[in-house]
Image: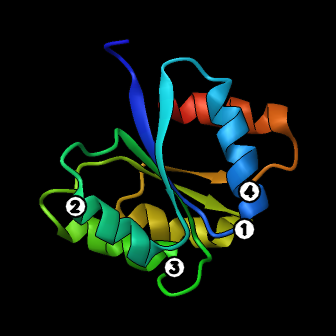
Amino acid sequence: MENLKNTLLVEDDKDDQTFFMQALADIGNTMLCDVVNNGKEALEILKRSITLPSFIFMDVNMPLMNGIECLSELKKNPKTKNIPVVMLTTSKAQTIKAIKLGAKSFIVKPDNFTALCRELEKVLI
C-alpha cells in the first residue's frame, strides 16, 4: 500500500464521475480521495488539504471555472504546481493549450469502460 496513488477527480458530469470512479476502482494501487464539480471547488479543496493528491484528473469543460483556468492556477501555486494533472476532454483541440500550461497528459473520454481503464493505467504508471 506504500505506492497508493490518491487521486482527485474534477468533473461536473455525474455519469462521467460514476464511469471514472468504477474504472479507478478496477486499477490497483489507486484511491479516489475526492470528487468536485468544477475548477473553483478543486482549488478550494486543495487549499484546505493537508495531504495533496498524487494525481488530478480534470475535465476541460466545466461551469464556474473550466479545467484550463484551474490548471493555470494550480501551476502558479507552489503548493500544487508539481501535482501531475491529467486533462479529460472530448476534443483533442483543447489538449495543446493544456499541455503548454503543464498538464502531464490528457485522456480523450472514451465511451467504454475497458478503454477508460487502459487510459488510466497508462497515465498512472
Q: Which residue is mark 4?
A: 16
Q: Which residue is mark 3?
A: 66
Q: Determine whether, in the image, residue 115 is placed left or right of residue 38.
A: right
Q: Give the answer, above or below, for where 51 lies relative to 29.
A: below
Label 3 to label 4: alpha-carbon separation: 16 Å
| Circle 2 or circle 4, nearest the eye | 2
Q: Are marks 2 and 4 in contact (CB under 8 Å)?
A: no
**Most foreground residue, 103 or 6:** 6
Label 2 to label 4: alpha-carbon separation: 25 Å
Specify the amino acid type for callout 4: Asp
Residue 71 x, y percent position in the rendering: 38, 68
| Circle 1 or circle 2, nearest the eye | 2
Locate residue 70: give its quadrant: bottom left
Residue 80 x, y percent position in the rendering: 22, 57
Q: Secondary structure at mark 1?
A: loop
| Circle 3 or circle 4, nearest the eye | 4
Locate residue 92: give its quadrant: bottom right
Specify the amino acid type for callout 1: Ser
Quadrant (top left, top right, bottom left, bottom right) of the N terminus: top left
